[in-house]
Amino acid sequence: MAIEHLKTRGFMEAERLAEAELVEVENLVRVAGFYKEKARRLVEASEQIRMLGDLERLLSLPTEELRRLLLSWRGIGPETADAIVLYAAGRLSFPVDAYTVLMMARLGFKEHSYAEVKALFEAAMPRDVDTYKECHALIDELGKACCKAKPRCEDCPLRDLCSLANNDEKGY
């Protein structure tokens, strides 16, 4: 809904968003929660993009350079940077979210840091953008439906592999 609000005001272009009044952007993204911080970061990111020239120029940077640059911007962490690299730039960089870390821990993997889980997925999967996107989307769906802080193991397709489901534990 926040994106639709931004679209209706013509703020999907970095140039326009960079020049927007912060209070107007806050009002448009209010539905998303933490709207003041999100609005400020959207405007700041748009200013960064404008300084580089445009979004196409940003997204055309070599993958590691793009990721490093995004990580240098306030409010962009590894997951967001990898999501931008994968979904917006169409390049290989697997985003690891909380669902991924939780699922992996429950499946018995010892890797818990972002970098460790990312490396594990990238080493195991075919080097294909669509595969990365599909895998990330499926993990998110599994997390939303089953592998939550308060799990629904009875509905989980991975329950036979899961230490939580097999040990009758209650949480991670």
Image (cartoon, rainbow, N blue to C red):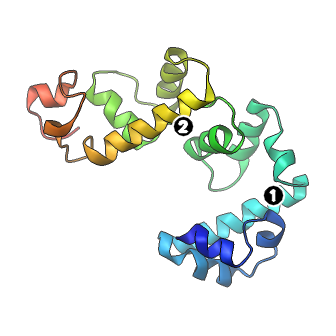
- Drawn side of residue 145 relative to residue 134, left or right: left
Q: Position of residue 135 (x, y in %)?
A: 47, 31
Number of residue marks: 2
Label pair 1/2, CB-CB below 8 angstroms: no
Residue 158 at x, y percent in the picture:
24, 27
**Residue picked out by circle 1:** 48
Amino acid at pointer 1: Gln
Q: Against 126, is 23 above or below?
A: below
Q: What residue occupies the far left of the structure in this picture?
A: 168
Q: CA distance from mark 1 to mark 2?
A: 22 Å
- The residue that mark 2 highlights is 95
* Residue pictured at 74% horizontal, 64% vertical: 44
Could you tell me the amino acid type at mark 2? Answer: Pro
Residue drawn at the location 10% of the way across and 27% of the way down: 167
Q: Quadrant of the C terminus?
A: top left
Circle 2 residues within 10 Å: few <14, some 14–19, many ≥20: many
Q: Which mark is residue 122?
A: none
